[in-house]
Image (spheres, rainbow, N blue to C red):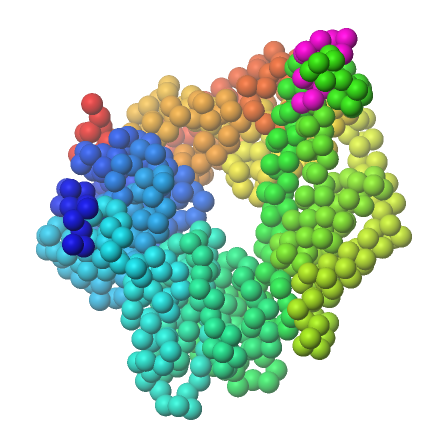
């Protein structure tokens, strides 16, 4: 009855997906490629190379190595046909980025692109099991693949142990990725931290609550929850944990929070509903500390509960910012400020991309003078009343006007989401207001950045104003937006607006005055930044500098945009070139990544070089920076302009001097590709270029 609808589906793990005591290569790319090959040969993935690339792309964003010699690389990919697990017990160990060294136990979790629930259930259940020393020890002691299968199936949700998909027979299974207090996968945690069952302490014992959350909201969120729960049991403390995972969370009841003696925030992102914990002593850290040092965090929370001077969660706050305790484990303000600014930039970029590309298409259809007449054409004409230029001019004007309106949200979106990163939703109104004022007074991008910070911190400050209980409900929707908008608006108009506008005007004049060596130097610097971390904070800073100043009436800004885009295209193209001319220097997976990198580079997706940089940063990144610097300098030297903020070779129509753009791009690609090839040739070892073992993807290609 329980599986009648799905008996024909394959089990999520079987003997063909297990490799015990094997050497799969010296780096994680080789291990991932080998396990992906196993999945493909078993008919669970249509393309081993594509699956490996998806896993390594996920790996580049956040390492999946865990303390204790474990790793759980994972991905959702179109090439996966059945949710599956592959497992390897490695000899020798391979580094997956864990803080305590390389891993010998590796699970590769693969799910189809649309199988989000399956993916999270499996990953969550495995992550929780890997916190248990007995489970890990059993994996190391397993004598056969059948032993491993029995161990894995014993910890997976019931509907995934027998089949690769949901059967719909277990009504509680969906909570396995939710709150640990309701999770069947965390049944032990439920008795430890639940509603009193399993308490080992007396009635006078301490009670703690905790929130765990990581950026992806899948593995570390739940591992931290279970690690803290186990530590609380050892300490004889009652603990309730709210996991704010990617599939949502079940908030702790208000009565439980009210009875708690202290709060633990083990999060790498903002705490949702932080104001619920107002007035409680708090200990805060990143999520990995809760995994690595759960006993220490429980002890610190108990000390805070008995310390009248301990830091507390601010009452009435809706802020998402992590709160620091007195333990020194909170995020530093340098890191926090970078996160705040990158949040604003990440929300701003879609407005820039959509608006900029539409403007470029407007130029393509209506000509480069369409900007001067677009508003009049759109208001005065229609498809039944075309302007003098005909249908092309009308459509060009419509596209240009839509793009201009979308682009006009650039500074307000930047400011609004900077404030949002500081104060959560109550920061949106003062942030967007600050951005609008910055545009109005001519302070531009710099004004939006400063105004967003002021708006966010103003909202945070207003949230701390003590109010009677009947007025607290008005704080997030009325009082905070009203007072914070008033504060930031008054400051921008009366004190900061004109000085910031002067700075913006001065910067614009300086950029317009660049010529010769100074322009080339700026192009070199931007090229170095674009290739330094391939989509990271430095890369985004250079890109944000370019798009924030993008103005079709400002030639200097268009030249900067061209330099940034060209330099950002170099890394994937250079790695594609190197892996083509010297394939023996690269693993099979890297050679396949190199083929894909041609298209990624042509599309201005710098992240196409990340798999290469992650596997060999000290030879790849300097080589890419050399090529990017050359390209950036050449583009600025030759006066290439670009009016579209994205698109790579597909927006050549939006460039002037496009031939020089292509020559500069080719020069940087060749120099970067030759540099990395020479670096690998000079320093390679025999093992580095040896063929991969028999589990490599070549064994399954047809």
Please identify the residue farthest to the front as the structure is shown: 384
Range of magenta residues: 387-399
Q: Is residue 162 above or below residue 54?
A: below
Is any part of residue 107 visible from this angle? no
Left or right, residue 522 beside residue 672: right
Quick one: 525 or 642, which is closer to the camera? 642
Q: Quadrant of residue 369?
A: top right
Identified at 19% across, 29% down, the residue is 699
Q: Is residue 580 above or below residue 219?
A: above
Q: Quadrant of residue 379?
A: top right
Left or right, residue 585 beside residue 145: right
Q: Position of residue 420 (x, y in %)?
A: 64, 53
Q: Is residue 247 above or below residue 580?
A: below
Quick one: 639 or 504, which is closer to the camera? 504
Q: Position of residue 501 (x, y in %)?
A: 84, 41
Instruction: Please identify the quadrant where the C terminus is shown.
Output: top left
Instruction: Please identify the quadrant where the N terminus is shown.
Output: bottom left
Q: Position of residue 582 (x, y in %)?
A: 35, 22
Q: Position of residue 565 (x, y in %)?
A: 59, 27
Quick one: 279 or 640, which is closer to the camera? 279
Identified at 56% across, 73% down, the residue is 277
Residue 388 counted in the magenta span: yes
């Amino acid at each position: 009855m329980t599986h009648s609808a799905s008996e024909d589906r394959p089990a999520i793990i079987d003997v063909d997906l297990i490799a015990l005591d094997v050497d799969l290569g010296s780096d994680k790319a080789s291990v991932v490629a080998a396990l992906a090959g196993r999945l493909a040969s078993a008919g669970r993935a249509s393309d081993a190379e594509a699956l490996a690339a998806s896993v390594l792309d996920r790996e580049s964003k956040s390492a999946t190595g865990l303390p204790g010699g474990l790793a759980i690389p994972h991905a959702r990919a179109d090439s996966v046909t059945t949710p599956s697990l592959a497992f390897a017990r490695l000899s020798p160990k391979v580094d997956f980025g864990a803080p305590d060294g390389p891993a010998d136990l590796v699970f590769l979790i693969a799910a189809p692109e649309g199988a989000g629930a399956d993916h999270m259930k499996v990953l969550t259940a495995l992550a929780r099991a890997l916190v248990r020393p007995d489970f890990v020890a059993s994996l190391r002691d397993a004598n056969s693949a059948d032993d491993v299968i029995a161990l894995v199936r014993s910890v997976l949700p019931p509907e995934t142990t027998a089949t690769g998909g949901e059967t719909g027979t277990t009504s509680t299974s969906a909570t396995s990725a939710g709150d640990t207090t309701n999770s069947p996968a965390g049944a032990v945690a439920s008795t430890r931290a639940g509603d009193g069952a399993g308490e080992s302490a007396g009635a006078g014992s301490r009670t703690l609550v905790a929130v765990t959350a990581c950026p992806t909201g899948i593995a570390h969120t739940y591992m931290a929850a279970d690690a803290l729960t186990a530590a609380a049991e050892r300490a004889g403390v009652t603990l309730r944990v709210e996991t704010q995972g990617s599939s949502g969370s079940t908030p702790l009841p208000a009565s439980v929070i009210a009875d708690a003696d202290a709060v633990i925030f083990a999060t790498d992102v903002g705490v949702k509903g932080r104001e619920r914990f107002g007035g409680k002593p708090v200990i805060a850290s990143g999520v990995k500390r809760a995994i690595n040092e759960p006993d220490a965090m429980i002890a610190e929370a108990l000390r805070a509960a008995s310390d009248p001077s301990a830091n507390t969660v601010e009452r009435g706050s809706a802020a998402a910012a992590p709160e620091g305790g007195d333990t020194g484990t909170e995020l530093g303000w340098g890191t926090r400020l970078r996160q705040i600014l990158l949040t604003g930039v990440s929300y701003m970029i879609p407005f820039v991309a959509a608006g900029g590309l539409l403007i470029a298409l407007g130029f393509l259809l209506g000509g480069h003078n369409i900007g001067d007449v677009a508003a009049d054409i759109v208001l005065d004409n229609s498809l039944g009343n075309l302007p003098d230029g005909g249908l092309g001019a009308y459509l060009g004007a419509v596209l240009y006007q839509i793009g201009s309106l979308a682009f006009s949200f650039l500074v307000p979106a930047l400011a609004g989401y900077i404030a949002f990163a500081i104060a959560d939703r109550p920061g949106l109104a003062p942030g967007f207001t600050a951005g609008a004022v910055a545009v109005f007074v001519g302070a531009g991008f710099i004004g939006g950045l400063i105004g967003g910070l002021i708006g966010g911190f103003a909202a945070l400050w207003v949230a701390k104003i003590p109010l009677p209980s009947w007025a607290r409900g008005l704080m997030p929707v009325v009082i905070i937006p009203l007072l914070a908008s008033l504060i930031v608006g008054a400051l921008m108009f009366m004190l900061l607006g004109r000085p910031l506008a002067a700075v913006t005007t001065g910067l614009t004049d300086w950029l317009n005055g660049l010529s010769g060596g100074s322009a080339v130097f700026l192009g070199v610097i931007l090229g170095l930044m674009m290739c330094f971390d391939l989509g990271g904070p430095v890369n985004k800073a250079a890109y944000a500098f370019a798009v924030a100043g993008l103005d079709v009436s400002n030639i200097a800004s268009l030249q900067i945009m061209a330099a940034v885009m060209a330099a950002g295209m170099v890394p994937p193209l250079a790695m594609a070139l190197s892996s083509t001319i010297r394939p023996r220097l690269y693993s099979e997976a890297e050679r396949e990544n190199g083929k894909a990198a041609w298209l990624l580079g042509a599309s201005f997706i710098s992240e196409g070089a990340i798999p290469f940089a992650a596997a060999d940063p000290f030879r790849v990144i300097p080589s890419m920076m050399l090529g990017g610097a050359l390209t950036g300098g050449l583009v600025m030297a030759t006066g290439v302009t670009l009016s579209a903020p994205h698109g790579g070779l597909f927006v050549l129509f939006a460039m002037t001097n496009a031939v020089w753009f292509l020559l500069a791009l080719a020069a940087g690609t060749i120099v970067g590709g030759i540099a990395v090839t020479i670096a690998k040739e000079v320093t390679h070892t025999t093992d580095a270029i040896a063929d991969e073992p028999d589990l490599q993807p070549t064994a399954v290609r047809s």
